[in-house]
Image (cartoon, helix red, strand yellow):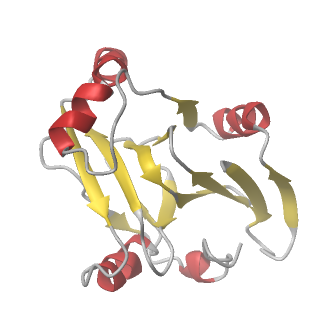
Amino acid sequence: MTQLIVYSAINPADILLDTQDFDTIAREVAAAGARIERWTAAQPLTPEATSEEILAAYRPEIDRLRTERGYAAADVIHLRPGNPNWPQLRQKFLSEHIHDEDEVRFFVAGSGAFYLHIGDKVYQVVGTDGDLLSVPKGTKHWFDGGPRANFTVIRLFTEETGWVAHFTGDAISGTVPTYEAA
């Protein structure tokens, strides 16, 4: 289930908000400069759907965002438990970073948590099936898919180069509860 937990960045044990109400989540995330919305597939998908089938099922929403925000590329990432690359990827994603473009993820299946570090707060947004989250360029953040990642996401980019992170070196991501701990 979609969830938002807002922590004090100064003392992450201090939880300022914990909600699963989507309207409240959307309002709080928008106030922080990010975006969350829900999408429905234009046609049913099976768990074995190919990347091409997934992109076709969400083509109207992808095209809408391309028109609105100028995204040039879309792809699909499938991560399953037991992926030998996940522990190394997880460590990279858990380090606070920024991007020169928006980071846009739509959860086709599974879940994961984006953490937005804005001022004196950290917003943990758990995205699940049907959730799109857009983190604006230049926003300090990190991502956690848990110790056994299990998700399929559509990624949207303005640049063909895809995911390029600029790490901040701030250790704050190590002080906030991880996805599975929260």
**Horizontal and vertical percent for residue 38?**
55, 30
From what the image shows, is residue 105 above or below residue 149? above
Residue drawn at the location 46% of the way across and 74% of the way down: 94
User: Is 57 or 112 nearer to us in this picture?
Assistant: 57
Q: Is residue 52 left or right of residue 152?
A: left
Q: Position of residue 157 (x, y in %)?
A: 25, 39
> Which residue is at 73% across, 59% downward?
121
Q: In this view, does 56 lie above or below 120?
A: above
* Residue 134 seen by the camera: yes
Provide residue 101's location: percent of width, then percent of height. 32, 42
Residue at screen point 76% across, 57% down = 6
Q: Evaluate whether residue 158 shows in this view.
A: no
**150 is higher (above) or lower (below) than 132:** below
Residue 149 at what x, y percent from top left? 42, 71
Task: Give the residue at x 75% y 58%.
Answer: 5
- Give the residue at the far left of this rendering: 160
